[in-house]
Image (tube, rainbow, N blue to C red):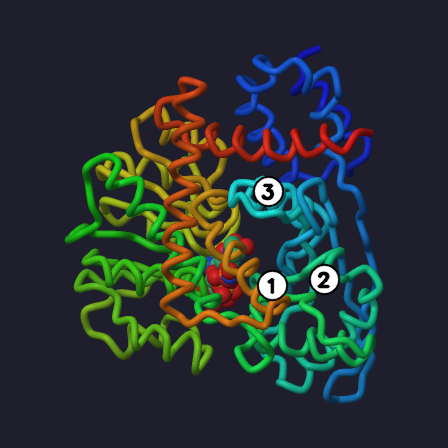
């Protein structure tokens, strides 16, 4: 039996049939590392593929807490500590009602290779809870974060497993999680990143994923003797990654014309008004419909008004598209429309926002496709800078962090491109990234013995 089917069968025996997102990620990685598996038989002899597809540890815990009405609420919490061959587990925490073991297994599996691609010594993990922070008071958010950490702190540690932010977990939540760990353990350890500056966070961490995404795209375009200057760009999402991507696109002279949230999408042909977007999404925490109400040039398309299920922003003609909202938000219909509208580059800011079918369609049609595990690795890279600043007490200024981020993103591109050349993959950055990440993890596993 082919190694891919063999590995998928093995994974199915230990997973539940509903692990749709995890199997999607597994199939993509296993398919694209074939050239490395064929060229290096010692990976097969040492059963690396079969070993890498099993999480080292899957933790499921219940979170019991009291809401503002003094009622007991119960949520499910999870942490998938997938692989620590390269270093301590590292990965974000997501609070969203859709969180389940499938989503977290896919995110943790992707995180292993993303972290490896950065060249830093960190393993891969992801965690979260099926808690919806929307509409909750500050007090409720704090109580939930404290209960989450109380249920799980024994598995965390600065050399064991380091948490971070993700959807629904920003600086406020990170601060509460950190505070509770400190109270429970009487330590001030770097067990979580994306901390506020007042708790030892790093300058530039908040913007690192969005800025890094644009730096990565800029580097690959320079390699193709192209640039973002004056180019129309479409972006989905209106959260941390999307807003900072828009900010950096403007800084490089591009024209970002869309954004979206869970209620609908904005098309603003004059360019997104960044100050207004920040005020609505970060300060007032409103729906994007409020953006269109304040800005005559913009149109707002409600999600329900767009029946294909895919995000409306992909209907808008553009040079470069940046999906920055959530997984599987760019499907084959959206890909077909983007290609027929002449898109040149698609770079993923969110994790796995593009379906496998859509990725294949881009490749077949000569669109340069930058996968998340390379293009959005700036966030985790600056998280490691945060950890290092916490350990050494030597803090960097914003300019120093930005210079390091630029270099890290440029190096990631260079190493992936070199891998593409080595395996004659042309501009297949998906395969180049997967092979690069896989080999780094596999070689570390081999070096440690069984
Ligand atoms: P945020 O919670 O800050 O923002 C997410 C945005 O996406 C929100 O505007 C949200 O809308 C929107 N959204 C969520 N679900 C949908 C949907 N089904 N359709 C349309 N829009 C939707 O998260 P981040 O920006 O931090 O994360 C976005 C993505 O980037 C995730 O995939 C995350 O895993 C990934 N990522 C984030 C990193 C980081 O450093 N933050 C690092 C690496 C990856 P609404 O405002 O209505 O909730």
Residue behind label 1 places its C-beta within 8 angstroms of ligand 1: no
How crowded pointer 1 is (Cα within 10 Å; few <14, some 14-19, many 20+) is rated as many
Rendered image: mark on residue 158: 2
Residue behind label 2 places its C-beta within 8 angstroms of ligand 1: no
Residue 365 visible to an observer of this rendering: yes
The residues tagged by marks 2 and 1 sit, at their Cα atoms, a distance apart of 9 Å
Quadrant housing residue 105: top right
Query: How many numbered discs sit on the rendered protein?
Result: 3
The image shows residue 116 at horizontal and vertical percentages of 57, 41
Residue identifier under label 1: 387
Asked if marks 2 and 1 touch (Cβ < 8 Å), the reply is: yes
The mark closer to the camera, 1 or 3, is 1
The residues tagged by marks 2 and 3 sit, at their Cα atoms, a distance apart of 21 Å
How crowded pointer 3 is (Cα within 10 Å; few <14, some 14-19, many 20+) is rated as many
Seen at 66% across and 30% down, the residue is 442
The image shows residue 439 at horizontal and vertical percentages of 59, 29
Q: 365 and 225: which one is in front?
A: 225
SS under mark 2: loop
The mark closer to the camera, 2 or 3, is 2
Rendered image: mark on residue 110: 3
């Amino acid at each position: 039996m082919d190694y891919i089917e063999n590995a998928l069968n093995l994974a199915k025996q230990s997973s539940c049939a509903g692990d749709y997102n995890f199997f999607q990620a597994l199939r993509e990685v296993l398919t694209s590392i074939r050239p490395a598996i064929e060229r290096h038989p010692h990976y097969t002899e040492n059963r690396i593929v079969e070993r890498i597809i099993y999480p080292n540890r899957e933790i499921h815990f219940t979170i019991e807490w009291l809401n503002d009405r003094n009622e007991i609420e119960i949520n499910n919490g999870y942490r998938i500590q997938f692989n620590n061959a390269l270093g301590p587990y590292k990965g974000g925490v997501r609070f969203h009602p859709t969180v389940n073991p499938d989503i977290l297994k896919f995110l943790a599996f992707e995180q292993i290779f993303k972290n490896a691609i950065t060249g830093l010594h960190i393993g891969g993990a992801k965690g979260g809870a099926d808690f919806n922070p929307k509409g909750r008071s500050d007090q409720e958010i704090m109580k939930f974060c404290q209960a989450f950490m109380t249920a799980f702190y024994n598995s965390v540690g600065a050399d064991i497993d380091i948490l971070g932010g993700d959807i629904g977990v920003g600086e406020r939540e990170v601060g509460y999680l950190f505070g509770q760990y400190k109270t429970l353990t009487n330590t001030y350890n770097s067990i979580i990143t994306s901390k506020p500056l007042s708790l030892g966070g790093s300058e530039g961490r908040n913007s690192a994923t969005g800025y890094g995404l644009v730096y990565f795209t800029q580097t690959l375009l320079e390699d193709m003797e192209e640039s973002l200057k004056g180019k129309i760009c479409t972006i989905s999402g209106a959260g941390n990654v999307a807003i900072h991507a828009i900010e950096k696109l403007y800084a490089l002279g591009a024209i970002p014309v869309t954004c979206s949230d869970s209620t609908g999408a904005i098309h603003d042909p004059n360019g997104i008004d960044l100050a207004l977007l920040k005020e609505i999404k970060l300060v007032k925490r409103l729906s994007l419909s409020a953006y269109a109400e304040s800005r005559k040039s913009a149109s707002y398309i409600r999600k329900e008004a767009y029946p294909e299920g895919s995000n409306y922003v992909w209907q808008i003609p553009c040079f470069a598209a940046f999906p920055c909202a959530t997984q599987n938000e760019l499907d084959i219909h959206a890909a077909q429309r983007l290609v027929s509208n002449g898109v040149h580059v698609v770079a993923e800011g969110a994790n796995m926002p593009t379906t496998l079918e859509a990725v294949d369609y881009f490749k077949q049609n000569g669109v340069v496709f930058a996968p998340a595990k390379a293009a959005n690795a700036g966030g985790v890279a600056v998280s490691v800078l945060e950890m290092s600043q916490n350990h050494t007490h030597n803090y960097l200024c914003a300019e120093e962090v930005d210079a390091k981020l630029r270099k890290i993103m440029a190096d990631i591109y260079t190493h992936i491109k070199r891998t593409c050349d080595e395996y004659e993959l042309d501009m297949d950055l998906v395969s180049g990234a997967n092979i690069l990440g896989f080999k780094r993890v596999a070689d570390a596993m081999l070096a440690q013995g069984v």
